[in-house]
Amino acid sequence: MSIIKPFSAIRPTPEIVANVATHSVERYSKDEIKHILVSNPVSFLQVINPAEVPSQNPEERLHAIKHRFKDFVSKNIFTQDTSPCFYIYRQIKNERHHIGIIGLASVEDYRNNVIKIHEQTLALREEKLKEYLDVCEFNAEPVCLTYPHNKGLNELMQVKVKQTPLYDYITDGISHSVWIVNKQEEIEEIQNHFKNIPAIYIADGHHRAASSARLAEKRKAANPSHTGNEAYNFFTAALFADDELTIFSYNRIVQNLNGKTIDSFLAELGKKFKLHLITGNNHEPFQKKMLSIYTNQQWFAIDISDLEHSPDPVSNLDVSVLSDYILSPILDIHDLRNDKRISFIPGIKSKEEIENIVDSGKIAAAFCLFPVSFEELISVANSGKEMPPKSTWIEPKLESGLLIYSL
């Protein structure tokens, strides 16, 4: 049984929402952030990336973020709903429609494996995000959760989106629409549907969920009157049915070939797998058990279909095969979390962008993968195991500063 709660969102006034809400900081270049900070005084980046505080002083920076947030509230850039609500959110990007419900998920559900994970997290990053929440005291970007398609929830959302939206705007070619759900009978209907869903799954935001759990542990230990209903026991979540999300691959780039020449590296690959030159424009693997590699201004397809099928849902993933049979034994890359020779590229990047990265001379090769399926994701989560880091790039990516939860 999943516990999903409404909340009174702190949110931009409708007239300026398109100027306030932003992408995650990581999706901007440094130059883009500088430009926004100079040109847009109401951007939420002014809150979460205050220019006047040196980044090398983390404690000062967190307190500056908290101060800037309060400043935005006092200037009526943000308003707060007077009663707890759910919010229907729709994003349209490149003709892909994603519609879901934004509310609060339970830290207790996360601890008890009602909210299931599929990807490993970094303890250091969890701790940093926990400190961020502890000082700043708000959730500005929801964790993206998914659940098996539910007819009742889908019908409710389809009725709501025919009504006048609270927000309806476009930024960077992406359409964002929000409808408010504040009638008690509709709130209870949503909650009752989720009570009948035995498990939900983290699609994106493993570190945000884990940091919320850490914060709850800290505040519970310091609160002798803890009841379980305190704000710190919940975190914002955007919940999408499994057919409302799109999974892209998360590709890998390596800085060097472990002292091997390109020819000797390809020769080693050819001894393990069927390898052939790609001459057309379709650089991405077109099916599972296929990889592709770009190096020395050439694309090659790697057929891994002859490998014996593994009953282990993690070992059987293409991303695991890449690590177990190529990155580790041939390139001596064993720790994807900490090895500086490897980094990751979202599968939404174009062929030209990948080629430019490698052709720059700083990167030796790029590996592209076929996306993990929802069936594979759920199989891994249900098994209690975890995928390698950066195994999936899932959309939609949620906006920051759109619907804020106060802690």
Image (spheres, rainbow, N blue to C red):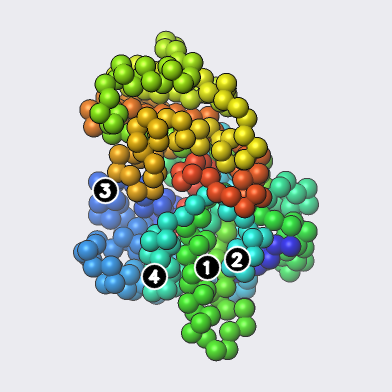
Residue at horizontal 31 percent and vertical 60 percent from the top: 49
Q: Which residue is mark 1?
A: 213
The quadrant of the rendering that contains the N terminus is: bottom right
Apparent side of residue 345 relative to residue 235 in the rendered image (left or right): left
Number of on-image labels: 4
Residue 131 is marked as 4
Q: In terms of image quadrants, where is residue 244?
A: top right
- List the residue tagged with mark 2: 111
Q: Is residue 274 above or below residue 152?
A: above
- Percent position (x, y) of residue 6? 64, 67
The residue depicted at 62 percent of the width and 73 percent of the height is: 83
**Element assignment for label 1:** helix
Q: CA distance from mark 3 to mark 4?
A: 24 Å
Which circle's residue, 4 or 2, is located before the other in the chain? 2
Q: Amino acid at mark 1?
A: Ala
Are discs 3 and 1 less than 8 Å apart at CB? Answer: no
